Image (cartoon, rainbow, N blue to C red):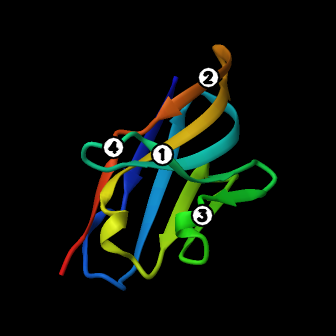
Amino acid sequence: QVRLVESGGGLVQPGGSLRLSCAASGSIVRINDMGWYRQAPGKQRELVASISRGGSTQHVDSVKGRFTISRDNAKNTVSLQMNSLKHGDTAVYYCNADAITRVSDGGNYWGQGTQVTVSS
């Protein structure tokens, strides 16, 4: 089993910055792709950014140039640096990971979510 714990959410003014972090723990053998998703009230959960184990990244068009995903394989962590935040970025942000554990050949895991609110 893998546990993902997010941190770093909060209230920020438009144009401000936040950094989200996610730490994975458990009987992990290897974590492959990691990502950040978000879900705003009344909307479907959407992928914001993803990163492969080798460091290849993808960002949804709406955050390109403002958000940057990164990871530390040695620490089993993934981060999302969010700059120039807009009202439309308000959502619950979820960490996601594809991982191989000592009891499973592969599984997909979610964190509990962290609230990001952009408001003046």
**Could you tell me the amino acid type at mark 4?**
Lys
Specify which label sits upstream in the sequence, 3 or 1.
Answer: 1
The answer to whether 25 appears left or right of 98 in the picture is left
Q: Which mark is residue 43?
A: 4
11 or 21: nearer the eye? 11
Real-space Cα separation, disc 4 to disc 2, in angstroms: 25 Å
The answer to whether 106 appears left or right of 22 in the picture is right
Query: What is the secondary structure assignment of the residue under circle 3?
Result: helix
Residue at 43% x, 82% y: name it: 84
Query: Residue 29: x, y in percent?
Result: 70, 31
Q: Which residue is mark 3?
A: 61
**Could you tell me the amino acid type at mark 1?**
Glu
Real-space Cα separation, disc 3 to disc 2, in angstroms: 27 Å
Specify which label sits upstream in the sequence, 4 or 2.
Answer: 4
Tell me whether the residue at label 4 lies in contact with that at label 2, contact meaning CB atoms closer than 8 angstroms. no
Real-space Cα separation, disc 3 to disc 1, in angstroms: 12 Å
